[in-house]
Structure formats: structure tokens, C-alpha cells
Amino acid sequence: MIWQTILLALRAIRRNVLRSSLTILGIVIGVAAVITMVTLGDGATAQVTTDISKLGSNMLQVRPGQGFRGPGGTRSTADMFDVDDAEAISREVFGLEAVAPTASRSQQAIYGNKNWSTSVMGTTNAYLQVRDWELESGRQFTEGELRSGRTVCILGSTVRDELFGDQDPLGATIRLQKLSCQVIGVLESKGQTGFGRDQDDLVMVPLRTLQRRVAGSNDVGALYVSAQEDISTTAVKEDIEALMRERRRIASSANDDFHVRDMQEIVSTLTSTTRVLTGLLGAVAAVSLLVGGIGIMNIMLVSVTERTREIGTRLAIGALEREVLMQFLIEAVVLSSFGGFFGIILGLLAAAAGAHVLGMPFVLNSGIVATAVVFSAAVGVIFGFFPARKAARLDPIEALRHE
Amino acid sequence: MNTEIENHHLIELAGIAKSYGMGAYAMHALRGIDLHIDKGEFVAVMGPSGSGKSTCMNILGCLDTPNSGTYLFKGLDVGALSRDQRALLRRNYLGFVFQGFNLLNRTSALENVELPLIYRGASARERHRRGRETLEAVGLTGWESHTPSELSGGQQQRVAIARAAVIEPEVLMADEPTGNLDSTCSREIMELLCAFNKERGITIVMVTHDLEMALYAQRTIRFLDGLIDPEESNGGKRS
């Protein structure tokens, strides 16, 4: 009997193709919007995750002050670190691969008639090791250059492009404010971080050079630490915290005046942020699905009114109340399921196109597709029920008399 | 008519009354009807508007229930049935033909005729076979795939009669079947109904305003002010 009812519903839909397709359109748009938003959101999450793993997932950052203030540097009243802190960590914490003390300043980099505002970072070769960063050309700093603070520099690829274009920068001399600096190497491009910051926009100089010739102090702004492959970053983080509390003479009752940031933590923070955004976008899109559902209800109500005589005829012929109910309910579910089907196709196409344009990975979330299928059918049941019940409860005599 | 053997009446109305509204404003459509119709009869129902004949037809067709009185259909008390049970009774024993045809739009003649069989759960093959057979019986061979808008009024009423007859009902209820048709078409329709009555033994109860159409029936029942007019009703044979 259910098959007969489906047959009746399909015949009724086929009888009014234009109106049926317009009704479907509401659901198509709703489902497509949800699918597109969620798929793009998942793509963004995946991209953030891969971007951050490019930073090195076994990396920790140690910064003075409390809380994480982003990669731009710290603004804090807490004491800065110095080179001894870095040495103490590498000497006393177990399982480390490298420890890189860094200090940064914003500077104008000038070559010929070109100038470019960038970040000048004083550090050691250990920084390249921590960040797992290769040189595209040239060489790293020598021990001598690091010890005596020579005026040599390694360029990030963005700075190289801005100042030199296609020219070979090796051996050239650029100016950083009053400091003349010989280019000895160029870094491989790393692209943007998950925060949207260009990682290649920097000039690396030996730490001592920056401290003496640019900053004028022996402060170290941040320590970059990388743990060995099989060592838990959580354990390393705890060891560093204990060591730094001791070195900075922090009373056991007082809070840390420094912060150790684990990359895993950043990954989870960022992915949860993008998840929330995805959820919000999906929710907004779901509203349009709701509107589509109301569209179905509207059309079904119109259809019941318009087909009152038909319903009367069916009832007179001997259709049961529940058969009329099922017919209209199935009509609504078939309409919304069709809408769901086309919506999924359209949504995935739009998401694929969007991911291509935004340069993001296209992540097919089968969960959301399944949800869309279930949800669009549910929309049909929920919004089709009221009109269907109205049809089923018609008095056949009144319905037959209806003009 | 043989009224002695009560159990053998197909339809038996006793003291049927129906009123609409309450108290002083109540409209008494039927004031106590007694009526017997036997299997194989062709009964014409006549009477002025508001005389209660439509109300009586609705009750006979199990579409409406009386306020008082009993209606026995094949000995079954219809008053005791639920809405769904009455629907099943209509599905299996009654066929309806309306003045306005009431065919489904944008649906072929064959699909229209098959409709009652769908509710009876017949297989597609059986539906097609019986649908075609019945369309042939009403003289519409070759018109199976035409929709109502492509058919003349007379043809549409033939489809409607085929739809009512396809289940081989006990009773075919026709409410002014020729009300919207010209006299030639009307006569053709009446001859069709007579043929179904004679050849298939389908009992027919037909409301009409047209005396000429009523003459096709074996018996005419006249309604007046909610009662059957005994003077005017007759047991005359068809001409």
C-alpha cells in the first residue's frame, strides 16, 4: 500500500512540474548553502592544521609575560630573557633538539632605490633547525660571525623579491637603518601562517649583531625550542617552566611571568576557532533551509486548497484518512528530498569552486552530506504534516462541493 | 416491489432524519425517510432544490451520517461504522458519478479509471487490464492517454462512469450525471447507465431534475420538504 501511495504522490508531483520545481528550489538553496559553508569551513580548518604543522609541531615558544600575544612579539612589563636562559635550557632540559634565542625589531631594509619595511630578527643557526627551515641559496652564519656580531644577513624570500626582484642578492650589501649588512643567504619560502602573516617577510642577522647594533640591549625576546621526535612536548614544557621559575626566582605562590607555548595548543586553539566559525556559517545557512521548509508548507497548503475537489473525489472513492495524509506527506518528502539531492550536488560544486578560488583544500565531509539528506527529508515531514492533515480531515461532501 | 422479506433488501432506510444547525434555527433536511432499494434496481431521485434529496444521497453514499434512524446496507448498520469503515465500504461496494465529473486534471483517462483500483491495492498489470476493459465498455477505446481537458463533456462523464464501474460496485450513485450535458450526450450517458444496470446488474441510484432522464429508471422517488412524496413516487417500469 505504501508503494501505491508513493505512486500517487509521484503522479501528483508530475502533474505540476513548474510549481514542484519552484518549491524544490527553496530547499536546493538551503541545502546547498549549508553544504558549501560547512565544506569550505572544513577546508579552512584543514589548511590551518597543515599550515601550523609546517611551523613544526614539536616546537615550543618561551616568551616573557603572561599569555600568548601572537607572533608579532611581546608587549610586557616582565623581564626579558637573555642568552644565558637559552643556554640553561639547552643544558638542563632533557630531550631537546635545539634552542634558539631571538630578538626582533621592525626596520626599513634598503637596497639601491628600493626600500621595504620588515622585521629584523637576531638569532642563531638553531632557529633554522627549530623551524625546520632550509636555505634556498647561500649559507648559514659561521661561528665567528655569531660570536663577534658581524654585519651579515640572511633574507626571507619576500624581502629578497621586494629589494632584488630577479637579481641575485648574494654578496650584495643592504642597509638596515644605519647598519650596512652583507647578504650571505636566502631562506626557502614558507608562505603564510594560519594567522595570515607572511613568514617570509624577515631579515635574519646574528643575535649579537641585533643586540649591539640595532636594539642596544642584551635582551632576548623569545626562545624557540624544539623537542626531539619521540619526546612529549608537554613534558618538555613542564621542565622548561620549572627551570625558568627557578632562574627568575619566582616564589611558589606567585604566577609565572613568562609563558611556554606548545604548538599543539596553538593548533587546537585555531582549529576550534575555525570550527566555531564553520558552525556559525552553517547555522546561518540552516536558516535558509528553514525558509525553504516554510516554502514547502506554503505550497502544500496552496496545493491542498487547490485540490480540494480532488481530495473529495479520493475520499468518496474510498481513500482512508491516513492514505490521503500519507499521499500529501510523501509528496512533501519527495519534493524536499529532491531538493536535498540537488542541493547537495550544487553545494559540493560551489564548495569545490570556492575552495579552488580561495586556494584551500576541498574536504568532503560525508557527515554533513548524510545530515543534509536526513534533514531535507525531515523538513518535508515536519512542514508537510500540517497541510497533509488538513487534507486528510476534509469532509468529503464539503470538498466535493468546493469550487 | 417485494417488501415482505426484509433481509433481502440491498439498501434499507428506516426513520432517517437529518438536520443542520441548532434549536430554532435548525434546518431539517430529512424528516424521517423510509426507503428500500433492491439489488439490480435503477432508481431515479427527483425533487425541488432543498427537498432533501442531496442529503439523502450523501447518506446513501455513506458520505454522511443521519441524526436518527437506521441505514442498513446489505444488512450492515452503517450508523455504527467509523469514518474509515465507511470509506472501506465505499471503496468496495459503491461507485460515484458527479455532475461536475470530478476527474483528476492532467491525468490520463486510463489513470483516472485506475484510481479506485490503486486504493484497492491491485497490481499494475491488473489495473491496466481492468481500466482498459472498462474504458472499452464506455466506448472510449483509443482515448486512454487523453487528459480530461482533451475530452468533451460527454467523454469526460463516460470516463467518470468507467471510474465508478471499474470496481464492479453493488451500487452506482449518480448525482445529476447529465446536468452539464446537452440532450444528445445525456441520452448516450443514460443508455450507458442502463446497459451497466442490465448487463452487469449494478444497482443505480440517480438524482436528476430532468423528467426525460428519470424515465430511463424503473422507479422514481420524489422528495418534498424532507420527506418522500408517496403520491408522486412510482414503481413504473422504464419505457
Image: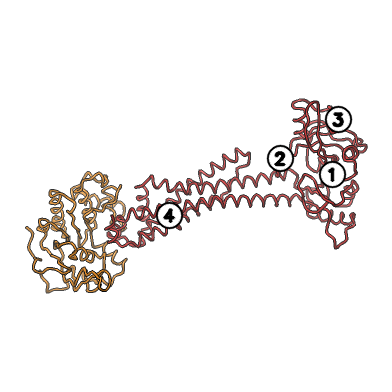
Chain colours: A red, B orange
Is A11 displayed left or right of B9 in the figure?
Answer: right
In the picture of the structure, the residue carrying the numbered disc 4 is A297
Q: Position of residue A99 (x, y in %)?
A: 84, 46
Spatial distance from mark 3 to mark 2, Cα to Cα? 26 Å
Spatial distance from mark 1 to mark 4, Cα to Cα? 65 Å
Residues at marks 4 and 2 touching, judged by CB atoms closer than 8 Å = no
- Residue A182 is marked as 3
Chain letter of disc 2 in the image: A
> The disc labelled 2 sits on which kind of residue?
Gln
Measured along the vertical axis of the image, is residue A183 above or below residue A283? above
Give whichever of discs 4 and 2 has the lower sequence position: 2
**How many other residues sit within 10 Å of disc 4, few (<14), some (14-19) or many (≥20)?**
many
Residues at marks 1 and 4 touching, judged by CB atoms closer than 8 Å = no
* Badge 1 element: strand
Q: Nearer the viewer, residue B207 or A97?
A: B207
Residues at marks 3 and 2 touching, judged by CB atoms closer than 8 Å = no
